[in-house]
């Protein structure tokens, strides 16, 4: 009986986490540097959705390529940071995440 109770608790936690992800996906945050000349747009799940760079820095085509590459790099960095955090939490015995 205790096993089924634990499984239900796990499912409830997983459902709550999914609900939180859905809510956070609807949030948008903006961060800027150099008085707004460089701006990052990110959702509440730490997924970068865009980068904006003032035209004074680049020609338009180079600017668009750089913005795309920066968005991809930011998302890669966030994912790597999350994986490192999960690995450390597992090593410290704080959480058990299968596959990590």
Image (cartoon, rainbow, N blue to C red):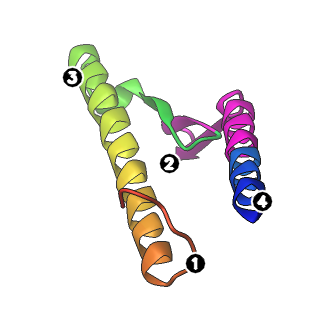
19 to 84, vertically: above or below: above
Q: In whole angstroms, how far apart are the C-alphas of marks 3 and 4?
A: 62 Å
State yes or no: residue 34 in magenta.
Answer: yes
Q: Determine contact: label 3, label 2, CB under 8 Å.
A: no
- In percent of width and height, residue 94 lies at 57, 78
Residue annotated with mark 1: 94
Residue annotated with mark 4: 1
Front label number (2 vs 1): 1
Q: Secondary structure at mark 4?
A: loop
Segment colored magenta: 14-43
Residue annotated with mark 2: 34
Q: Residues within 10 Å of mark 3 (few under 14, many from 20)?
A: few
Q: In whole angstroms, how far apart are the C-alphas of marks 2 and 1?
A: 39 Å
For marks 2 and 1, the one nearer the N-term is 2
- Work out whether residue 35 can be spotted: no
Q: In whole angstroms, how far apart are the C-alphas of marks 4 and 2?
A: 59 Å
As drawn, the label of residue 62 is: 3
Q: Secondary structure at mark 1?
A: loop
Q: Secondary structure at mark 3?
A: helix
For marks 1 and 4, the one nearer the N-term is 4
State yes or no: residue 9 in magenta.
Answer: no
For marks 3 and 2, the one nearer the N-term is 2
Residue at (69%, 52%) from the top-left corner?
7
Q: Is residue 13 left or right of residue 55?
A: right
- Work out whether residue 55 can be spotted: yes
18 to 1, vertically: above or below: above
- In percent of width and height, residue 11 lies at 70, 45
Front label number (3 vs 4): 4
């Amino acid at each position: 009986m205790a096993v089924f109770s634990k499984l239900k608790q796990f499912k409830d936690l997983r459902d709550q986490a999914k609900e939180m992800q859905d809510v956070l996906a609807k949030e948008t945050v903006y961060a800027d540097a150099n008085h707004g000349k460089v701006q990052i747009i990110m959702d509440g799940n730490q997924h970068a959705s865009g980068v904006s760079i003032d035209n004074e820095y680049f020609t338009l085509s180079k600017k668009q390529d750089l913005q795309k590459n920066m968005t991809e790099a930011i998302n890669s960095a966030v994912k790597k940071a999350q994986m490192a955090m999960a690995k450390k939490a597992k090593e410290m015995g704080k959480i058990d995440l299968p596959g990590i």
